[in-house]
Amino acid sequence: MGSIINTDPELDLVVLGLSSGISMESIEFALCRFRQQNPAQPVRLELLKYGETLLDPGIEKRLTDMISDDFNSPEQVAQVNDILGEAFAEAALQFIATNDIDKSTIDIISCRAQAAWRIPYPAVHQTRTSLRLNEGTVIASRTGITTVTDFRVGEAVVGPQGAPSDFDALLLHHPTKLRACQNISGIGNVCFIPPDISGELNNGFINFDTGPGNIYIDAAIRHYTNGAQRYDVDGEIGKRGEVDEEIVDDFISSHPYFQRSIPKSAGRDDFRASLAYELISKAEDKGLSPEDVVATITRITAQSIVDHYKCFAPSQNIDELFLCGGSAYNPNIVNFIQKNYASTKIYTLDVAGIPAVAREAITLALQGMNTVVSRTVRTSHGAETRQQLIAGKISPGDNYGQVMQKVVQFGNGETLEPIRDLVNVVNGEEIHNKW
């Protein structure tokens, strides 16, 4: 007697994305549901829950101390790797408990690994590499949930710079408009999304890091408030200050990152934490007030964004710019960009149905989903190679067999092509962003 077999099962995965920026002040969570009828159909994204929790400052100190000591102790590297894993696992379990989430409904945790050191531009005697810490096996063991980490390591192997994600392009591509999505977290990064070709996503999108985002602004705020304030709320402190253009111009003209062409990406090796205090000291030596210092450091971020647009945007006629990340709401940055691009309509990503502060964690969730279903991701136009890759490392949890059964049935064990289109679902309504 035969049985009926579903030869075309729908993909339905729930992924918890965990993101923590270069400053490691907090962890952002995005619990996402991804559904897809078959590999050729659009992926439906639904953000189920978002949250944030602060990280123990001592963890970031251990990482930066280790880097300052030039990794002179293998024990330090091993300890920090596991400590990060324990911290992220504990945070994930706390998020699950606080929001009364049934842990068995989560298929995957997808988590950022912290860049301890990178060699993106190797010398003759060096190899391009990226050392990332945050042990996925610890997270999987503590939570019981299969965990995906280390997305950037695969990038270093095949060559392209920039985040191996096409999320911004999939979310915001438009039939006729040139759009851009600018993230302003610890490090700033932009994705330029040209108009569609034949009604489909234009693979000519460009993404790269624009330099410091809020890493130095936040450091200055913590410095002047003795840690009582973590960031410049609504840009109020910087708004009261005067920008020292000489310091801004000197920083941007002398820093090697700004002299490089795209593709490129930035990390601690480019914008180390101590640079913030060098800037503060230099400004104070010139007699600048705390408000002036914050205004000047904020302008460095804004100026570096604008300079990169002028050099590398596909066109200076950018129709719409969507801002995300913690400093998307800082008027001192937004107004400076608007002044330089007067005809560009500037929004926060919220208008596209994605909370501006949740974008990075959602991107991590999407990347983790792609990894477990063996789906390649597109690389940015202009990358050293357009080789498609499956990024990330999988650490099996207690549910690994169930997850693999789901994904093998969906993709028949084959490598899948990149996502063709993404549909964002908010409160049951499809948001297409084609206005």
Image (tube, grey):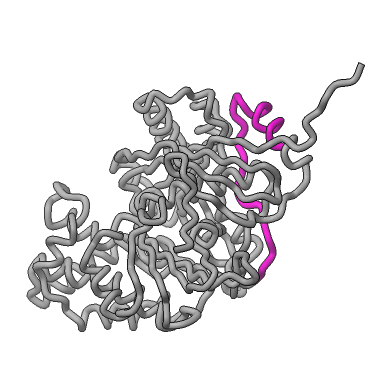
Q: Is residue 301 left or right of residue 36?
A: left
Q: Residue at x 52, y 38 (%)?
A: 33
Horizontal side, residue 388 vs residue 129: left or right: right
Residue at image location 25% in from the left, 64% down from the top: 276
Quarter of the rendering occupied by the C terminus? bottom left
State whether residue 79 appears in this view.
Answer: no
Q: Quadrant of the N terminus?
A: top right
Q: Residue at x 90, y 20 (%)?
A: 2
Residue shown at the point (30%, 81%) measured from the top left: 340
Position of 187 relative to 227 (above/below): below
> In the image as oriented, which residue stretches furthest toward the top?
1
Q: Can you give x and y, in whole percent of width and height, for residue 257 in the image?
A: 42, 75
The stretch in magenta equals: 385-407
Is residue 169 a member of the stretch shown in magenta?
Answer: no
Give coordinates of residue 381: x percent, y percent: 59, 72
139 up-or-down from 357: above or below? above
Total numbered labels: 0
Residue 366 position, x and y percent, is: 54, 47
* Residue 422: image location, x then y, percent: 56, 53
Using the rendered image of the protein, determine whether residue 247 is visible from the camera's viewpoint: yes
> 263 above or below 145?
below
Q: Is residue 305 above or below residue 173?
A: below
103 lies left or right of 271: right
Residue 386 included in the magenta stretch of the image: yes
